[in-house]
Image (cartoon, grey):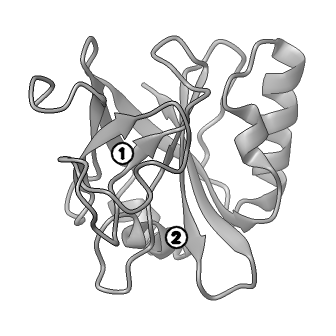
Amino acid sequence: LYQQNNDMVGWIKIPDTPVDYPVVKYSDNEFYLHKNFNKEYQFSGIPFLDYQSNDESVNKIIYAHNMKNGTMFASLADYEDKSFYDAHKNIMYDTLYDKGEYEIVYAFTTKFKYYNYADIESEERFNEYVTQAKSRSFYDTGVNTVYGDSLITLSTCAYHTSNERFVVIARKK
């Protein structure tokens, strides 16, 4: 697939949900909003890594649309219900260089500017991000994070609230 589109940086999958897609990255966060893997117009777009994130980033932010037909990151909204979390605690995110299994730590809706934490470079910023996420989370997963953990943050629109985003944060196992 990388030979087909060298913007590909990984693959995201949440078992037993429709989330099972390649992840791309471009020099801005607009290019893949309404383009498919082949860079052709498609309203639903494709999941993409924040332009500020890279393989070494402590926090990799991945965005995708919340499609009303249940595709892309629509399933993230189901994490508002703890029973859905209990049945879907893990996210697989494989890059070109690494296989990754992540366990979900927080799920919440927010206007908090989590996207300003795409590249966390200090323990202070890491702790600030985790504190903000924890205070907004719908429930306690019992999973803790510490500085040095590798995180992925999945982001989509939250239709049931005004101008908010639905965010799921997971740490690498």
Three-letter residue code for mark 1? Asn
Q: Is residue 37 left or right of residue 70?
A: left
x, y percentage for residue 137?
71, 60
Q: Residue at x 67, y 56 (%)?
A: 140
x, y percentage for residue 68?
38, 86
Secondary structure of residue under mark 2: helix
For this rendering, which residue is in front, 67 or 143?
Answer: 67
Q: Residue at x 24, y 18 (%)?
A: 96
Looking at the image, which residue sits at the far front?
40
Number of residue marks: 2
- Report which residue position mark 1 lands on: 90
- Report which residue position mark 2 lands on: 82
For this rendering, which residue is in front, 28 or 150?
Answer: 28
Mark 1 vs 2, N-terminal side: 2
x, y percentage for residue 80?
56, 74
Three-letter residue code for mark 2? Lys
Label 1 environment density (alpha carbons within 10 Å; few <14, some 14–19, many ≥20) = many
Instruction: Name which quarter of the figure residue 111 lies in.
Output: bottom right
